[in-house]
Structure formats: structure tokens, C-alpha cells
Amino acid sequence: MEGSKVYLAIIIVRAIYAGMFVISKAAFNDGMNSFVFVFYRQAAASIFLAPIAIFFEWKTAPPFSFLIFVKIFMLSLVGITMSLNIYGVALKYTSATLAAATTNSLPIITLFLALLFRMERLNFKTKDGILKLAGVAVTMGGIVTIAFYKGRPYLKLLLNHPLVRFHGQEIKDHVSYNSTWTKGVFLMLLCNITWGCWLVLQGRVLMSYPSKLLLTTWLCFFSAFQSFIVAISIERNMHEWELGWNVRLLSVAYCGIAVTGISFYLQAWIVEKKGPVFFTATIPLSFIITMVFSLVFLGEVVSLGSVLGAILLVGGLSCVLWAKSKELKRKKLSNCASNKDVLQDGPPKSDQIENMP
């Protein structure tokens, strides 16, 4: 029964992320400024998480020193504020399906950064090391394919009438031929690099500030402040800050509450039950759900190049995850064997004690 709950939680989390890609794109199609969107999203997340974090972790939280403040502030700046603002611009240039596809490169980028910070090792003399390297190469091939190869035929619904239309929106059947497409792909890759930095450096910050829920709240709060500075310096027209009862308000509430709040809890529970490798291996599911949502709700057109590139990304990710799982399994067996040898040796016998110097 618990196993089925885990798989249900996985589907919910991946559907939430797919919804994030689609609803964010819908808000941008409606004319919402991406920088304003990031501020409202982080503000909503802060308001949602603050009372929960204070209730559960405030009494047990470690001291909030100036050094901790600097670490969390910089982590928020690099991993959230920069990442989300770059993501917003990239999503305007490309599509929700592309955003979901390039997310498959995140574990590969995280591996690169872990190697850079010497948190991970890559041994080229072993099969696992060669498989990891092959996975990285295939992933890079997928990114290049998405960026430069458009290809035909185009995947779209027979009627090609999206369920949701926006005022002033023009559905472009050949969006992949847009001159900004390649720029958007590499911006999305840069977004994943900054997000990978956040994943790697977050572990070090947690060592000095282990309250996960409070840390997430502080990150959202600092990111909201930073994003406000960015947004107000770029968008001075107050009319663009209005939300109203429309897709803009829906997207802000959805990303702030569902993505940051609900999915955060579910991800932590899934990792606790099945481990991080299992959770990361389900990333391609977001791409499949996003592609379906985009075709139905936004009327987006998916080119052959995007599909082939996504397949390469998923293949590269699978190679790396498979090598990592084998590596972890071998380490676990090695540790078990070492513990078994210690138990078999047992304590020294009486005659051994007498002969000791």
C-alpha cells in the first residue's frame, strides 16, 4: 500500500511541475512581465510558508548569526532569484515543453558542479565512470539538437484549437523558427546551471543551519526582496503590476503555494521513502505531462528536433543515474562486507590477550 502511495505522490509532484511550466507560459502569453511574476511568486511562497515554519521549527531553530544571514542571502540570490528570472525570460522565448525537456539536464549539471566542488569523483578506469561520461556527452547532444535542429513533422492536435486563449495572443505554429529560440534554449540551460549551484551549495548551508522548513522560508523571503528590486528597476509601469481575477493571479498563487509548498513536502517524503536517485529518475515524466498539457491548453507546436533532443536528454540522464545507482550499490555491499569481517573476527581470545605486549 505504501509503495502505491509513493508512486501516486511522484505523479502528483511531476504534474505540479508540469502545471508550473504551462501556467507560467500562459501568464507570459497574457502579457505578464516575467520579473514581476517572479516577485509575486516568491512573495506568495513566503506568506504561505512563514506561519508553517514558525509553528513547527521556530523553537528548535539554530541561532541566526550574521554569517548565516550572508550565506542564505547569497544562496537565494544565485540559486533562486537569478535562476527564476532567467527562467522567465527563457520561457518567453521558447515553450513550456522546451522548459520541461531541458530540466532533464539538471542532474548532469549538478554532477558537474559536484565534481568542481570535489563532492563527487569520476573514475575513468571503471565502467561506472565511463557510463557517467557517456551520459554527459549524450545530454549535451540533446541540448544542441533542441537548440539548432528544428525538423519536421510538427506534433500538434488535429484541430489545433487551444482550450485557453488570451487577449492579443497569436498562436504561432512554427514557434521553433523564432529567431530567439536558440537564445532561449541557452538561457534555459543557464537557469539550470544556477539551479544546480543552489542544489549543491544548499547542502553546505544546511550543515550550519539544519532547519529545512525555516531555511526554505528565509530563501523565499530574501528572494522576494531581491526580485522586487530587480522588477521595480525594470518595470516602472504600475499597470503591469496589477493582477486581477485572471490567469496572472492564478499563476502566482499556483507557483507560490502548489510548487513551493505542496511539492516541497511531497519531495521530502518521497526522498525519505525511496531515496534521491529514484526521485531524480522520474524527471522525464514532467516532460511527457507538460507536452500533453501544452498541446491541449496552449496549442503549442512541438517540432521533431525538440522530441529527438528530449529523447537524448532522457537517455543521457538514464545513463548517469544508472551508473550512480550501481556505484551506490557497490559501496553499500563493500561496507556490509567490511562490517561482516569485523563481526566474524570478534573480540580477541584469552590466549591472544596473554600474548599481547
Image (tube, grey):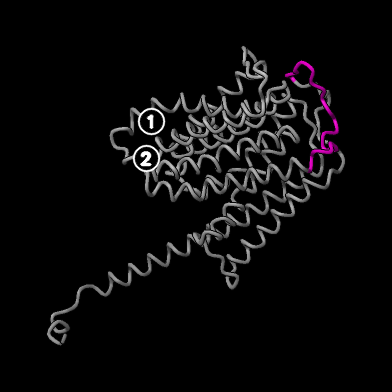
Residue 64: name its quadrant: top left
Q: Is residue 82 above or below residue 237?
A: below
Q: Is residue 170 magenta?
A: yes
Residue shown at 86% from the left, 43% from the top: 151
Callout 1 crowding tier (Cα within 10 Å): few <14, some 14–19, many ≥20: some
Q: State the residue position of label 1.
A: 53
Residue shown at 84% from the left, 43% from the top: 150
Predominant SS of the magenta segment: loop
Q: State the residue position of label 2.
A: 211
Q: Which residues are magenta?
A: 163-182
Residue 333: name its quadrant: bottom left
Q: Amino acid at mark 2?
A: Ser
Judge by depth and name the residue closer to the eye, 20 or 189: 189
In this orientation, does residue 257 appear? no
Q: Is residue 346 magenta?
A: no
In this orientation, does residue 240 appear? yes
Residue 312: x %, y % from top left: 72, 51
Q: Quadrant of the N terminus?
A: top left
The numbered mark at residue 199 is none
Element type at mark 2:
loop
Q: Is residue 141 above or below residue 128?
A: above
Of labels 2 and 1, earlier in sequence is 1
The answer to whether 160 appears left or right of 129 in the picture is: right
For the residues labelled 2 and 1, the Cα–Cα distance comes to: 9 Å
Judge by depth and name the residue closer to the eye, 254 or 132: 254
